Image (tube, rainbow, N blue to C red):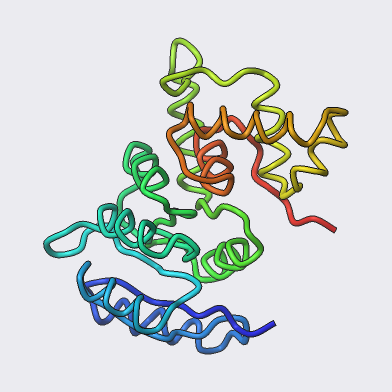
Amino acid sequence: MPPWRLLLVDDHALFREGLIALLSYRDDFTVVGEAEDAESALDQARAVEPDLVLMDIDLPGEDGVSATRRLKTEMPSVTVVMLTVHDDSQTLFEAIKAGAQGYLVKNVRSPELVEQLRRLARGEAAISRRMAARILEELRGQPEPFWPEEELTARELEVLELVAARLSNAEVAERLVVSEHTVKNHMKSILSKLHLRNRHQAAAYGVARGWLPRPRRRG
């Protein structure tokens, strides 16, 4: 497989240089562009067509969440992971709803960062251990279950968990002993309730909320 093409978006040149140095030793990643604000990020994305964008939230002017929303609208196939100093769950949920497939705090250790990026390359969600622990702590403090605007049914949660484990609709149908058409209808309902656009966002959102276990690599 060719290396994943990365675009780095951060207004601190030193931080970008550090990431480039870190990833230069990995054969499965190559940095193809850099940007320091939202507009240059969009321009660079159009020019280099990256597979993955590492997006800082605190950009000068337009923030990274808004930039991610614009980028995913124009280039929905591009994977976006947020790199940020923020560790609050509300910012995480906003980023995922904007289209981000991952959310990593900047003080993450380099081996974990590389492993999380490899998870993304395998189609999995990437959320740092620190964020996962913070979300679980928040959920434990809730007096009642922490649900979105409309509650998912038990069957929809089953479907979402299998989707997060990277099963296809046909495989989910076989596992649950239902038709593939039924699985597709469940996914439509899940996306509608969560106000999300695709199954990858739904899986990432479910992991972030603490409804689902962290996905493991198949095989």
Q: Residue at x 41, y 79 (%)?
A: 19
Q: Is residue 49 left or right of residue 90?
A: right
Residue 61: name its quadrant.
bottom left
Residue that appears at 36% across and 56% down: 73
Q: Quadrant of residue 1?
A: bottom right
Vertical relation: 50 (above or below) 117: below
> Where 165 falls versus 39 (above or below)?
above
Please tell me which residue is depicted at 27% across the width and 81% down the height of the picture: 14
Please state the horizontal and vertical placement of residue 60, each as a whole percent of the image. Answer: 14, 64
Residue 217 position in % (x across, y down)? 75, 56
> Toward which corner of the image does residue 120 lie, by quadrant?
bottom right
Q: How many marks?
A: 0
Q: Residue furthest left?
A: 61
Q: Nearer the viewer, residue 73 or 156?
A: 73
Quarter the C terminus occupies: bottom right
40 over 165 or under it: above or below: below
Task: Give residue 201's position: percent from left, percent from top.
Answer: 51, 46
Q: Position of residue 176 (x, y in %)?
A: 83, 29
Please determine whether, in this image, residue 119 is positioned above or below residue 99.
below
Q: 191 left or right of 85? A: right
